[in-house]
Amino acid sequence: MENTFVKVASFQYSSEAMIIKGRLEAEGIEVFMKDNNTIDTDPLVSNAIGGVKLLVRLGDKERATEVLQDVSRYSLDDKGKPLTCPKCSNHEIELGTTIKDIKSLFAFLFTFIAVVLPFYTKYKYRCNNCGNEFNLE
């Protein structure tokens, strides 16, 4: 039973999984990652294979779940408090980038054609509850 592993979380990219893996290991929980090399080689297959999976020993599952619940997946301010949506007052806020305006579209196309990294990216916070996009003031 000690060598039985169970999945406690999955992530789209290995960088996200590495952060949580570090947090679990800091709590003394041994963690194994599955499919991280496949996704690092070809990130487009992440959704097809279910992302990078974090596995822990069966005996550590309950403790690992508690640690995962303490980790906030939503954006925090500089003081560590959850951001609040100005429209609906919800705390489920994520930082994201979009290519919605013409300036960012042309910048993306130019850098794609020139085979360089994009130099113009617009970041906005987005509320998962109402869909409101906003910047911090």
Image (tube, rainbow, N blue to C red):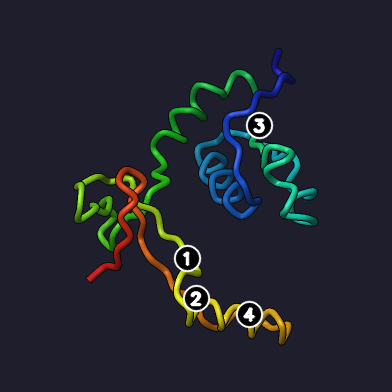
Q: Label 3, on which residue?
A: 55
Instruction: Identify the residue at image location x=52%, y=30%.
Output: 64
Residue 77 numbered tag: none
Q: Label 4, on which residue?
A: 109
The image shows residue 6, relative to residue 130, as above or below, that is above
Q: What separation in Å lies between label 2 and label 4 (alpha carbons)?
A: 12 Å
Image quadrant assignment for residue 125: bottom left
Question: Badges 1 and 2: C-beta atoms under 8 Å apart?
Answer: yes
Q: Farthest residue to the top: give it.
A: 1
Judge from the rendering whether residue 78 lies leftward or rightward of residue 69; answer left or right.
left
Q: What separation in Å lies between label 3 and label 1 (alpha carbons)?
A: 30 Å
Which residue occupies the foreground of this view, 36 or 130?
A: 130
Q: What separation in Å lies between label 1 and label 2 (alpha carbons)?
A: 7 Å
Nearer the camera: disc 3 or disc 2: 2
Q: Earlier in the sequence, mark 1 or mark 2?
A: 1
Q: Label 2, on which residue?
A: 121
Q: Residues within 10 Å of mark 2 (few under 14, many from 20)?
A: few
Q: Position of residue 47 (x, y in %)?
A: 67, 43
Amino acid at pointer 4 = Leu
Which residue occupies the foreground of this view, 33 or 11?
A: 11
Judge from the rendering whether residue 72 lies leftward or rightward of residue 41; answer left or right.
left
Q: Residues within 10 Å of mark 1 (few under 14, many from 20)?
A: few
Amino acid at pointer 3 = Leu
Quadrant occupied by the C terminus: bottom left
| SS for callout 4 | helix
Nearer the camera: disc 3 or disc 4: 4
| SS for callout 1 | strand
| SS for callout 3 | strand
The image shows residue 113, relative to residue 65, as above or below, that is below
Amino acid at pointer 1 = Thr
Q: Label 1, on which residue?
A: 97
